[in-house]
Structure formats: C-alpha cells, structure tokens
C-alpha cells in the first residue's frame, strides 16, 4: 500500500484530501503545517508527499528541498492557488513531479497521484537495476583466482576511470563483453548507456546504418530519421565486438569518429558531435589481419591504446572450479549445490575449447540433469565425459579404494596429482612426444612442462 504524506495548513482541506485518498486505498499521514511535516520527513520514508506551497513558517518549497535531500526517490506533488502557478513551475524545476491548482477536480488529482506513484516506482526499479548491474559486472566480482585474471582486474581498476580506447583480445567465449561491461560500470560514464554491437552479425549496409544512423529516405524502408549507436552511446560506452570483421570502408569511417568525435548519418549532410568511449574486441589477431590487408594499421593503433588480452580457460585451470560454482549459484539460486570429487577432476582436466561460455553451458546442462544438490560425472555433457581419465569414466575405484590412497591430502593436492597423471598418460600415448601431447591436450608446450611432475633426484 503506497504511503502518502499530506501537508496543508488548512484543517478543512487536509481532512477532505485525507478522506478522499484513504478511500482509494492509500496509507495517509496528514500533517497540519510544514513544521509537523518536517518531523515526519525526518523520521519516516514515504512514497509521495502532497504539499501546499503557501504555508507559514515552513512553506512547500522548503519541504521540497528537505524531501529531496532525505529521500531522493520520493515523488513530490505541489498544491497551489491559480495565481501562484509560476511558483509551482519553479518547484518542478527544483524536483517536484507535478502540481495541481485550487480548486482542484477530484479526477485530475487522483490521476496525478497515480502518475506520481508510477514515476516513483519506476525510479526505484531503475536504481535497483543499476545496483544489480554494478554488483554483477563490478571488476571485484569477476572470478579471478589465476594470476592472469588478477592482472586483468588490476588493469580494469586503473583503466576504467580514464576515457582511453581499449582493445580486448582473446578466443571466443573467454568473456570479452563481461570485461567491457566491468570497465564501463566502474567508469565515470556508468550512468550513461553501455551499447554492445557484434560487428560480425550484420552485413555492411545494415552495420553502417546501425552505427551512424540514417535520415528519412536514405534507402528503401528508411521511413524516418534514426539515431545511430554512436549517438545513443554518447556520454557512455560503445562496445564493438568482432571488430576484425568490419569492412575497410567502415573502418575508415570509424577512424574519423575516433579522431573528430563526429558522425554523419547515412544519406545525411549534417555533422553530429558524439562522445562515446570506444571499447573494441576481436578473437582474431588484428596484426595478422593488417599483414593480409584486411585491417587498417592506423585504426589498430587508435583502438589499442590500452590492450587487454584475456587468456583462454585452458591456460588458467585455477579459475575452472570457482567459475563452475559461480555459474551454479546463478543457475540454481543456491549456495548448497556441490560438485562431486570426480566431477571436479573432470572439469579441471577438460581443455574447454569453448572457454568460459562452454563451461557455463556445461553447468546449465548439469543443473538440468542433476538429482538433488550434488552434481556427478553423468550429469555433465557427453563431450566432457569422453575426455575424462579412464578410471573416472568407468566409474571404478575412484570413489572407493583409490581415493583412500589420497587420504589426508588437500583437494587441491589431489586434483594436481590427477592432472599430472593424466598428462603423463597422454605423453605415453604419444610415444614421449611432448609437443604432440600438448596439442592433444590443447595447451601450450610451456604449460605442459609447467604442469609435469618435477624430476626425482
């Protein structure tokens, strides 16, 4: 039930309005005069305050200032005599939602009250969504157990407050958009729009129209003027994913946006000033594309003022289990979902060619088939099961006698031993060829050497 603080220094008007609004189901707190209203404002929050403007010694404008200071999301309606409309308009400039004039019509008053309450509700929901967005994409909440990801978080913390362009590289599925959102959310632009666009998803003419907008009649179907995403993101951030797929023609236009901070809509003649922060990303090596003549070198240097490379998941196994539990909490809404020991070994031993996105989908699959709050190997996708060590895949002594051999060891120590055993078996299967084993495991040769058991003296 919405709560309304009703303020007037005329008892008869206060009584009439109280009766009217109570009859509509509202929780009414009447205050006879501004001084009493100040007491209520300082002790309790309200959804709406309806106050007369002309009161002594505390008038409606002073109540408005106090209300906006103590309760910024509370809506305020002003009541004024016909001859004081200018004062009411001034009150709206200072934050009042609307005003009604005496003598007011009941229907007009009720409609204005409903609109004010809807505005207050929308404002509150918007604040909650912003808080959720910041909680979800704040850099401190990115899963970062590995040294590589901790370095990324440190870079975000230093880069976010600046306006420099950022180029994020990394394989598909490593979370480039998540990093871009974290940069935006921790920047001074966070109150403005974050506008993502996958450049590979649109043909060139449509991509140009999306980026720069168009004027009416620019092409068949252009029935009206349309803002481009550079305009929408002005003051905020535009995220251009898969920038390497952009044509050379559009690359030259993007370069002009970065240099001149202005765009021209498709079919238009007017230059429009814009101020978006540009974050670009690519799973391709842009330096290779430059050598092939597919990417402008001058644009590359404009975009890569701050380069961020996100390592693939197979090179940061320390992040696998924390990420898995992170996704499980999001998917199940519970902190009690567990991964069995065998499941943990399988997740850390799998090379994750699809990176973090594949891990998230695997957890989604596991949640669908899990029985109760414990995820076992059979709940995982078939491609993960096929890659498991033989004893886990067969479901043999791993859960019984062989686990007893590791009694007293930490989980991390147990997983490390299983990983080394798996690597040694792969090397043996490739007749001692470590390079071939590394390719089969989809890790670098350096990573394989790092994970091998140290030679015994």
Image (spheres, helix red, strand yellow):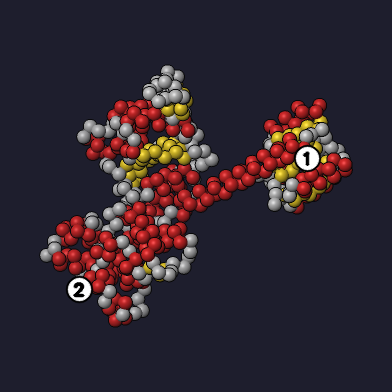
Q: Looking at the image, which residue is at 31% across and 48% down?
A: 172
The residue beneath circle 2 is: 457
The residue beneath circle 1 is: 51
Quadrant hosting residue 247: top left
Could you tell whether 130 is left or right of 23 in the image? left
- Label 1 Cα crowd, 10 Å radius (few <14 / some 14-19 / many 20+): many
Does residue 376 appear in the picture of this structure?
yes
In the rendered image, the vertical position of residue 331 relative to residue 103, given as above or below: below
Does residue 255 appear in the picture of this structure?
no
Q: CA distance from mark 2 to mark 1?
A: 86 Å
Residue 125 place in picture, x, y as percent: 58, 47
Q: Determine whether the residue tagged by mark 2 lies in a helix, strand or loop.
A: loop
Residue 232 place in picture, x, y as percent: 48, 33
Q: Which quarter of the image is occupied by the C terminus?
A: bottom left
Residue 447 place in picture, x, y as percent: 25, 58
Q: Looking at the image, which residue is at 13% across and 63% down?
A: 430
In the rendered image, the vertical position of residue 208 relative to residue 241, given as above or below: above
Residue 357 place in picture, x, y as percent: 35, 53
Earlier-in-chain disc, 2 versus 1: 1
- Label 2 Cα crowd, 10 Å radius (few <14 / some 14-19 / many 20+): few
Picture disc at residue 264:
none
């Amino acid at each position: 039930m919405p709560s309304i603080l009703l303020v007037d220094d005329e008892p008869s008007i206060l009584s009439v309005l109280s009766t009217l609004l109570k009859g509509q189901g509202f929780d009414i707190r009447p205050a006879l005069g501004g001084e009493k209203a100040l007491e209520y404002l300082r002790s309790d929050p309200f959804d709406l305050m309806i106050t007369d403007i002309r009161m002594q010694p505390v008038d409606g404008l002073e109540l408005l200032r106090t209300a906006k200071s103590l309760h910024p999301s509370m809506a305020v309606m002003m009541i004024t005599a016909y001859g004081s409309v200018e004062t009411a308009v001034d009150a709206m400039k200072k934050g009042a939602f609307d005003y009604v004039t005496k003598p007011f019509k009941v229907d007009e008053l009720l409609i204005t009250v409903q609109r004010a309450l809807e505005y207050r509700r929308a404002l509150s929901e918007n604040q909650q969504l912003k808080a959720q967005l910041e909680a979800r994409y704040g850099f401190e909440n990115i899963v970062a157990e590995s040294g590589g990801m901790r370095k990324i978080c440190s870079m975000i913390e230093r880069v976010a407050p600046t306006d420099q362009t950022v180029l994020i590289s990394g394989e598909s599925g490593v979370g480039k958009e998540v990093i871009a959102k974290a940069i935006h959310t921790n920047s001074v632009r966070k109150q403005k729009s974050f506008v993502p666009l996958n450049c590979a998803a649109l043909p060139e003419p449509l991509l140009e129209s999306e980026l720069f907008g168009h004027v009416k009649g620019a092409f068949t179907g252009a029935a009206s003027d349309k803002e481009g995403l550079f305009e929408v993101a002005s003051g905020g951030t535009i995220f251009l994913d898969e920038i390497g797929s952009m044509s050379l023609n559009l690359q030259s236009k993007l370069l002009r946006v970065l240099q001149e901070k202005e765009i021209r809509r498709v079919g238009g003649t007017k230059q429009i000033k814009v101020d978006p922060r540009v974050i670009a990303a690519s799973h391709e090596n842009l330096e290779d594309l430059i050598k092939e003549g597919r990417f402008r070198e001058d644009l590359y240097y404009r975009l890569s003022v701050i380069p961020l490379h996100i390592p693939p998941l197979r090179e940061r196994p320390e992040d696998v289990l924390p990420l898995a539990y992170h996704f499980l909490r999001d998917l199940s809404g519970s902190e009690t979902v567990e991964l069995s020991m065998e499941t943990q070994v399988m997740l850390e031993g799998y090379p994750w060619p699809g990176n973090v996105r594949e891990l998230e989908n695997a957890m989604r699959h596991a949640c669908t088939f899990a029985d109760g709050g414990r995820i076992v190997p059979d709940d995982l996708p078939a491609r993960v099961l096929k890659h498991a060590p033989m004893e886990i895949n067969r479901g043999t002594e791993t859960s019984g006698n062989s686990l007893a051999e590791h009694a007293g060891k930490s989980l991390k120590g147990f997983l490390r031993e299983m990983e080394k055993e798996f690597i040694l078996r792969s090397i043996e299967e490739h007749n001692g060829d470590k390079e071939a084993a590394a390719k089969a495991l989809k890790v670098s040769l350096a990573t394989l050497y790092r994970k091998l058991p140290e030679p015994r003296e």
